[in-house]
Image: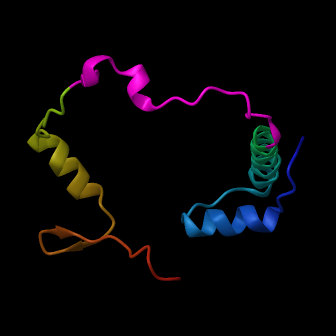
Amino acid sequence: MSKSITIEEVKYTAELARLEFSDEKLEKMTKDLGDILGYFEDLAEADTSQDVKINHYDFISERKNHFREDEVVPAEEKTKEIIKDNFPEKQGELLAVKSILTKK
């Protein structure tokens, strides 16, 4: 089942994310996103009245963290210089980024 989503909605979403796509890619993305939304509609219609309720602790033994610990790995100076040299805008020593909270 394919949910109806328009190419204009995909263009608008891409604009919010500041992404640009060719017309061919927009058409493919519109179809793919419609298929994904349709799949969620199918899931929403599934009968879950007989399903067993569980919580995330059922999957964790003794509440142990099964993920690795965070580790800070400093970037090499060469890497930092490459990033600075290729950054489009600078304000003194700072790297300037465009605001994403305002419209163009």
Count of residue discs: 0
- Note whether residue 37 is visible: yes
- Residue 78 percent coordinates (x, y): 14, 41
Q: Is residue 59 above or below residue 14?
A: above
Residue 19 rendering spot, x and y as whole percentages: 58, 61
Residue at point 10%, 39% (across, down): 74
Q: Position of residue 60 (x, y in %)?
A: 35, 21
Quadrant of residue 79 within the rendered picture? top left
Residue sitting nearer the eye, 38 or 45: 45
Determine the residue located farthest toward the top in the rendered image: 61
Give the magenta-colored segment's residue range.
Answer: 45-68
Is residue 48 within the magenta segment?
Answer: yes
Residue at x-position 38% and y-position 74%: 98
Q: Residue 11 appears in which quarter of the rendering?
A: bottom right
Q: Is residue 98 above or below residue 38?
A: below
Identify the image quadrant of residue 70: top left
Chief SS of the magenta region: loop
Q: Is residue 94 rendered to the left or right of residue 48?
A: left
Please name the residue shown 39% across and 76% down the image.
99
- Residues 71 and 18: in front is 71
The question of residue 95 being in magenta is answered with no
Residue at figure coordinates x 68%, y 69% from the top left: 12
For the N terminus, give its image quadrant: top right
Color scheme of the displayed model: rainbow
Against 17, residue 92 (above or below) is below
Q: Quick check: 97 left or right of 8?
A: left
From the top left corner, tell me how far across and down residue 80 is, in percent. 16, 48
